[in-house]
Image (cartoon, rainbow, N blue to C red):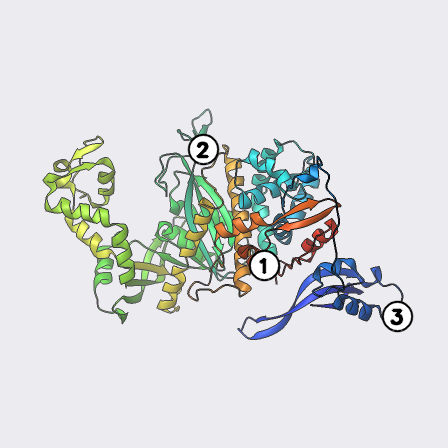
Amino acid sequence: MFIECIKNNGKNYLRLVHAVRKPNKNGIMVSTKNVLLNIGPLDRFDDGQPDYINRLRKSFKAGDPLIPSLLPFCSDRKATETYRFAIAEGSPDCFGHPRLFANILLEKILEELGLNTFFSSYKAFSKLEYDVYGFAKLLTFGRLLNPDSKAATVRQNLDYYEPILGEHNPDNVYDTLDFIFSHKDKIIRRINTNLVKKAHRSPQIIYYDVTNFYFEIEDPDEDILDENGDIIERGIRKNGVSKEERKQPIVQMGLFMDNNGIPIAIESFPGNTLDHLTLRPALKKNIDDLDFSRFILIADRGIYNYKNLLHVHDAGNGYIVSKSILKSTKKERDWIYDNEGYINTDTTFKYKSRIIKRSVTDEHGHKRTIEEKVVVYWSAKFQRRSEKENKKFLDFLEKLKQSPENFRITSKQSNSLKKFFKKDCLNLKTGEIMDSNDIKPLIDFDKIDEYKNSLGYYQIVTSELNMDTQEIIDKYHGLTQIEYQFEIMKSNLETRPIYVRTPKHVTAHLLICMIALLIMRLIQKRIVYSGQVKVDEDAYWSTGLNGERIQQALNKWKVDRLPGELYRFMDVDDPDLQLILKAFNIEIPKKLYTRTELKAIKKALKIFI
């Protein structure tokens, strides 16, 4: 660590920096500096005596700096400070009240994303009388640290070493949700603008996937109709295909994520919206107008639809999307299963590709001919995983084929069999349990055999005609990281079940969860970048520290006030918390702290390097 004097807006400015070596974009190790503390303008401290800067540096090295804010950073202080204070029996100071200090890191991230100035300017413009940014911070911090209901999150206000809100009306939390919904697109744009500017976001890849979240309610929302029976507003809590096989109404959420695993935007849809119908509206609202150079959209087969793909292509971007093999034409399936043309890398993996022309219809109903590359591959590992995941169903199919007269089939099993029904037969019988003899004539056992044969195979279509086939496969596999983000949202951030009711509040809730997820991912990326953890070379989006451990570590970062307006840190020697602190170059010397020194820690924080 050393003190340097730089020019800032033409004035001499002091700061404390730490020299580090890190790889540049070409992987070459170069020297750079991290700013530990922006001390301030030189003329604020210069005592008029000769050679002030050298005297300051010597005093800092000796452990007795001329500027008090440098004291926490002194590794060799001239004398050990002794703290003396007395606590009388019966004094409130007999009881400790550790408060969360982790919010200083989270708040600094929000500031670097430009959300502090965004909320402040819109509050002034809208003439709001309540602290909308304070409520937004509480909702975001609470979602990341201690997820709870909106009302309970507001009550967490006093859990922080300095309350986020002053005097307030708790009901304004719902007004804040209205505000966030009304400005959702602007909030996403502000975040992206700052990530482009400060983190150099320029995604070559954008991942998209859809998940859903359930509500603890019995009945779905009704659509609001006008006097002619036309829909004015669709209900958002609808019955649909739950990813978690829940019976309650759900809401669909589409998530865009960049190639660093950092969320870009979310969009919400009624729970009965099919996955492929979500992409174009989500693109138009969130991505099409962002200042991105050409990117490749990667999505799974639920999104496969040429109205979607041509929308991406016509915007000057590319796509890599998987396509169902069983829904392909017989001619396409014959080519997939034909061993000719496969490149056999070993006995566990093979792939091949071809470029074809297709006649398709775009979103405007126009017929068009396009050229695209089709990639198929087979993986023994993928086959074993599919067989394991579907073992019960595969065993059931085999026993049904061998002796159908011995089986009684539940309605759930009959639903699973629908894709194997012959088109020229119908069974109109109903009920929870169906005799297998009633459905036996409907089952197409040839389709069952083909289903078994398809396990282990995967098909991808792409606009990238000149991209290497193996690279296409590798890029598509990166889509698995978005599943991890959904897992964090559903576990650590407790996004569901959702308890808010109106479509506006549901959308605002999901945006808050996305911002909390984004903060967590930035912390994880910083841990990885710090080099403190071993990273899987095949998982460039590695987390460094999983969501649960980050959540637990941040909850340990607390301060306790002692008599004399002194503070001591709690549990900063926790290994996981140490990982986070070191990743952000936060040094916590073993001492007691004044309020000024606590504020200096936040002031010295640098989020993007």
Residue 119: image quadrant is: top right
Q: Earlier in the sequence, mark 2 or mark 3?
A: 3
Residue 38: x and y in percent read: 73, 60
Name which residue type carries label 2: Gly
Q: Residues within 10 Å of mark 1 (few under 14, many from 20)?
A: some
Q: CA distance from mark 2 to mark 3?
A: 74 Å
In the figure, 436 relative to 457: above or below?
above
> Dot 2 lies on which element?
loop
> Dot 3 lies on which element?
loop
- Disc 2 to disc 1: CB gap under 8 Å: no
Residue 145: image quadrant is: top right
Q: CA distance from mark 2 to mark 1?
A: 35 Å
Res. 277 visible in picture: yes
Q: Residues within 10 Å of mark 3 (few under 14, many from 20)?
A: few
Name which residue type carries label 3: Pro
Quadrant of the rendering where the N terminus is positioned: bottom right
The residue sitting at 30% across, 66% down in the picture is 354
Residue 532: x and y in percent read: 53, 64
The label nearer to you, 2 versus 3, is 3
Q: Which residue is mark 2?
A: 235
| Front position in the image: 121 or 400 | 400
Q: Earlier in the sequence, mark 3 or mark 1?
A: 3
Give the left or right position of residue 386, taking residue 9 as reference: left
In the figure, 368 relative to 416: above or below?
below
Q: Which residue is mark 1?
A: 196
Q: Which mark is residue 248?
A: none
Q: CA distance from mark 3 to mark 1?
A: 44 Å
The residue sitting at 61% across, 43% down in the picture is 137
| Front position in the image: 462 or 176 | 176
Q: Which residue is mark 3?
A: 50
Give the left or right position of residue 86, taking residue 308 as reference: right
- Disc 2 to disc 3: CB gap under 8 Å: no
